Image: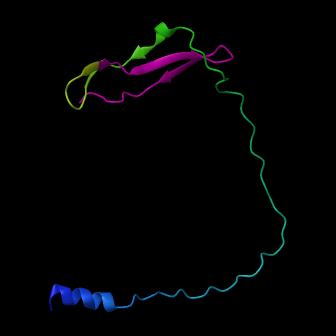
């Protein structure tokens, strides 16, 4: 049988439609009393918004990376942020530490 004949034979077939079996109606849900549990309140610890950076000189950085554009025409140095010291509304220090986005191998 040639490819052309095979294609004509396939085109002449009618698609088979699968039929799903009907589901039984489960009926109504019986009446009942709802029960819920109250969530526990906060412990009072945590960070009070807003956060403010008081001293930018306290920032630390990961090592400098040299990034080259895909065409190789341009290069620039990039030094990712490693940590940042902020102060919350209660004057408590908050240290944000950032992972090295591209650790050296």
Task: Name the residue: 51% across, 23% down.
Answer: 96
Task: Name the residue: 42% across, 15% down.
Answer: 60
Relative image position of residue 17 (x, y in whole percent): 46, 87
Relative image position of residue 57 (x, y in whole percent): 47, 7
Where is 3 relative to 78, above or below?
below
Compare residues 56 and 34 and report the one nearer the observer: 56
Where is 92 relative to 30, above or below?
above
Task: Name the residue: 45% across, 13% down.
Answer: 59
Magenta extent: 77-105
Relative image position of residue 77 (x, y in whole percent): 29, 18
Lateral position of residue 63 relative to residue 99, left or right: left
Compare residues 33 and 12 and report the one nearer the observer: 12
Relative image position of residue 33 (x, y in whole percent): 84, 65
- Quarter of the figure that contains the N terminus: bottom left
Quadrant of the image occupied by residue 36 = bottom right
Check if residue 7 falls in the magenta segment.
no
Where is 26 relative to 54, above or below?
below
Quadrant of the image occupied by residue 34 = bottom right
Compare residues 65 and 34 and report the one nearer the observer: 65
- Quarter of the figure that contains the C terminus: top left
Check if residue 97 falls in the magenta segment.
yes
Task: Name the residue: 51% across, 88% down.
Answer: 19
Lateral position of residue 7 relative to residue 44, left or right: left
Where is 35 relative to 22, above or below?
above
């Amino acid at each position: 049988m040639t490819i052309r004949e095979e294609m004509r034979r396939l085109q002449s077939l009618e698609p088979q439609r699968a039929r799903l079996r009907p589901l039984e109606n489960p009926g109504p849900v019986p009446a009942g009393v709802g029960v819920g549990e109250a969530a526990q309140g906060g412990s009072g610890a945590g960070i009070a918004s807003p956060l403010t950076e008081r001293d930018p000189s306290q920032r630390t950085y990961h090592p400098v990376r040299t990034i080259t554009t895909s065409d190789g025409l341009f290069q620039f140095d990039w030094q990712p942020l490693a940590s940042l010291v902020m102060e919350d509304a209660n004057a408590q220090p908050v240290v944000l530490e950032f992972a090295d986005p591209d650790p050296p191998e």
